[in-house]
Image (tube, rainbow, N blue to C red):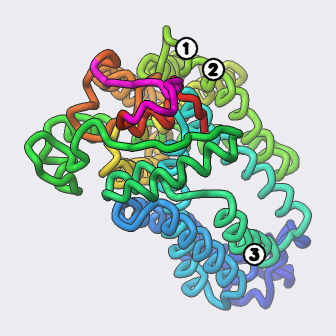
Amino acid sequence: MTCIDKNFSACDSRCPSIVYPYDKFQSFSTEWNLTCGTDTSFSSNTQSIFMMGVMIGSFMVGGLGDKYGRFPVILSCQFFSGLFCLISAFAHTWTIYVCFRFLTGFFLSGIINVSFVLTSELVGPSKRGIIGTMPALAFAVGIVILSFVSWLTQNWRVMTAIFGIFGVLCTAPLYCLFEESPRWHLGNGNVEKSKSILKKIARTNGHDLGDIELKVATKLEGSSKGGKLSLISLISHDILRKITLIQLVSWFTCSSVYYGLTIASGDMGGNRYISVILSALVEIPSNLVILYVMNLPQCGRVKSCVGGLIISSIFCGSIWFIPDKHTLAVTGLACAGKLFICAAFATIYVHAGELYPTPVRNLGLGVISVANRLGGVMAPLIVNLNNIYHNAHFVVFGVVGCLAGVLCLLLPETLGRPLPESPEEIYQSSKEVKIVSLELEKSDKRPLLLSDMLDEGADVDT
């Protein structure tokens, strides 16, 4: 950027107007001249404030999904995230803009976490791997679309308004295409509503369930001791505390390493939009491969997650030993590390949704998502260690990745297992979880487990 008056520098207070190199592109930083002195902190903190909204929303909205249902929370969050995104496009000051960005992030967290829980509860074990990796693939595709729209519009207000309008309009198809989780209804004692939804799903798939009865295998109160599960249970209950602590470390590690490697990679050079598009596209092969690997009986969720974390840590740690002049080798190792951390990230998302019992599944994912956002906030600080000691940040990524990988070995395998309804079911072997088939005569009036409707042995594969 330069001053329109050549006698002054761009950041000189006497400069009448600043000329920016990308004169066809207008960002909020250039519109409000947040490019000089202390004003630059306003620009750099905008994304942090947005992520803070996502972090707080992850903690608060998850509990609403468990209390009021998955479906109404998703619809509300979809509408309000789009609405506040749209309103932010008309902000006249930075303060007003970041307030609406915070609210956008707050409600966006409900879409991210609660929608994953809902879709996981609507399918059987054979489909949960696909459902779990879809958010990661959608994230990469979304970045590509965002870059193209930004490239075409060249204006932050127009771009923001487009995505805000799109977010609001998406509420209608969501209302028409989705149903409430039958597991949530059954967990709240609404057996008839759960049966109605399952029959509707069956009809859509060309099946007829006939006259059925539903029951759950264990008390949905959550434990053999009879106490209801809540936020305190994630700390007080031995099994839930162990799982939550390990998941907190794993999610923080995946987030900090992923965003840290993205930041450390720097600009690829050339067109900035193409650079962002290419950076997103390299994640797609990783997610497609891990979708296959995590569903292999020899690998499952645990080994896939552990492998991704440890292999990524090896690539990152190896950069410490590479001389500075071999920049191509450093770039290659960093990209390899990112590919494997993407694979681990996709796996822990699926694994976490399968670990927590139904009464606290939303709440559990919301709590560990806080660690995810903290990892994103810490990533730039870790990368700044490079200014103190060369390549020190890669060593940190290697150490934390290895630590998280070892801890994940303590988690139970969930591949092919029905979703747990109580903490006691989490560490039960698959042989101890009773699953029966719907291939019985319709005259058989025995009560069916909810897993009968949704798991692979059933006539209906939603």
Which label sits on residue 292?
A: 2
Judged from the image, the secondary structure of the residue bearing numbered disc 3 is: helix
Judged from the image, the secondary structure of the residue bearing numbered disc 1 is: loop
x, y percent for residue 306: 43, 20
Residue type at numbered disc 1 = Leu
Residue position marked by numbered label 3 in the rendering: 165
Is there CB contact under 8 Å for labels 3 and 2?
A: no
Q: Which residues are magenta?
A: 432-445
Residue type at numbered disc 2 = Tyr
Residue type at numbered disc 3 = Ile
Q: Residues within 10 Å of mark 1 (few under 14, many from 20)?
A: few
User: From the image, which quarter does the C terminus lie in?
Assistant: top right
Query: Residue at coordinates 34% horizontally, 19% vertically from top-left?
Result: 430
Q: Is residue 273 left or right of residue 50?
A: right
C-alpha distance separating marks 3 and 1 = 41 Å
Residue 103 magenta-highlighted: no
Q: Between 454 and 166, which is closer to the camera in this rendering?
A: 454
Is there CB contact under 8 Å for labels 1 and 2?
A: yes
Q: Is residue 16 left or right of residue 154?
A: left
Residue position marked by numbered label 1 in the rendering: 296
